[in-house]
Image (cartoon, rainbow, N blue to C red):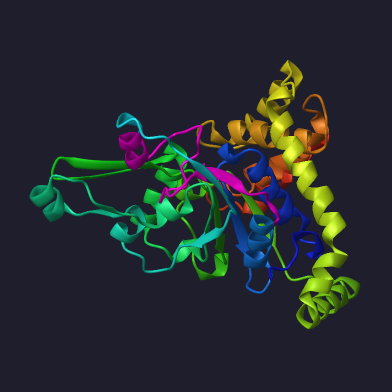
Amino acid sequence: MIYPFAAIVDQEEMKLALILNVIDPSIGGVLIMGEKGTAKSTTVRALADLLPEIEVIKGCRFNCSPLGPFCSDCLDKMSNGDVLETEKKKMRVVELPLGVTEDRVVGTLDIEHAIKKGEKRFEPGILAEANRNFLYIDEVNLLEDHIVDLLLDSAAMGINTVEREGISFTHPARFILVGTMNPEEGELRPQLLDRFGLCVQVNSLRDKALRTEVLKRKAEFDDAPKKFFKKWKQEQKILIEKIIKAKEKLKKVKVSDKALSNVVEITSKLSLDGHRADIVILKSARAYSAFNEKEEITSEDIKKVAPFALRHRLKRLPFEDISTEAEKLHAILERI
């Protein structure tokens, strides 16, 4: 049994960043920075377990949605006039191991089979498993850069195409990307950092009462997981209903001129490359508004999510400490 999401003590930033990505997956995933043993993977697995089942094409290796987009297999069936039946599946967490090869990530085409039989045979990779699930990468800063590039490109495009010798196979690759890293073990290139929608910092809890609560809940869960799960059932139910309502309400949340002006007021005064930060702040603020059942984005919503969207994008000038830009951000948010 998986530890209940609602029972995780503190780590509110991490939990909120993950929830916002569930409400609007186009935010672009979460990079979680911090030391080991801070419930990172536990939190992601707990959220995946909390979420309702998704509807998929029955028997599809890529979890295609009945609404599309479709993989090459489903498109072939549709062109043959086959009826695509559906079934329900739980979302899951697909882990990407360190040292993984490119073929293992994207999948492989059997060219010999195609030549002999005239049929495409595709061996799915991790991107296929991850479609409509969570893709979890522990220590993303230790992955080879070209693998990280591949993953981020697929996350941005929402599709994976493998081509060999004039034969191609396509399948959707839409997933909630969660990467973790300990900055002390090495940095990510700024170009790669920027491709993660949000970034949160997690630390070991210092408060004695919170640390005691962690121990208490873990002991309860280990001794009687079903009883512990039942204890948190109502809070889990309230949370999932809130997330589902937010997903349904998301596009109805009004984006006013004032909200747009507030976002630009923040980003224009910082040393940022491109416009991705602006887009991510707006999407995250809208998801946060929907989560809190608001009709339009408020200044408070923007102030809440802006640090998540900007923390990993702040640049320091030569001989300048990164905290200088962080202080500047804090001052800007105070005036919004």
Instruction: State which quadrant residue 249 falls in.
Output: top right
Taking the magenta stretch, the answer to whether it contains residue 74 is yes
Between 222 and 10, which is closer to the camera in this rendering?
Answer: 222
Image coords of residue 287 (percent x, y): 71, 36
Q: In this view, does 239 lie above or below 251?
A: below
Taking the magenta stretch, the answer to whether it contains residue 301 is no
Image quarter in which the N terminus is found: bottom right
Residue, x 64% and y 48% (percent of image)? 311
Residue, x 29% and y 58% (percent of image)? 103
Q: In this view, does 30 lie above or below 4?
A: above
User: Would residue 156 be found to the left or right of residue 324 on screen?
Assistant: left
Residue, x 68% and y 51% (percent of image)? 51
Image coords of residue 241 (percent x, y): 79, 44
Q: Identify the main secondary structure in magenta.
A: loop
Q: Give the range drawn in magenta.
A: 50-77
Between 58 and 326, which is closer to the camera in this rendering?
Answer: 58
Between 265 and 283, which is closer to the camera in this rendering?
Answer: 283
User: Would residue 260 be found to the left or right of residue 238 on screen?
Assistant: left
Regarding residue 7, the answer to whether it shows in the image is yes
Regarding residue 314, the answer to whether it shows in the image is no
Determine the residue located farthest toward the right in the rendered image: 209
Image quarter in which the C terminus is found: top right
Determine the residue located farthest toward the top in the rendered image: 257
Image coords of residue 261 (percent x, y): 71, 21
User: Would residue 105 be found to the left or right of residue 326 on screen?
Assistant: left
Image coords of residue 191 (percent x, y): 45, 46
Determine the residue located farthest toward the left in the rendered image: 116
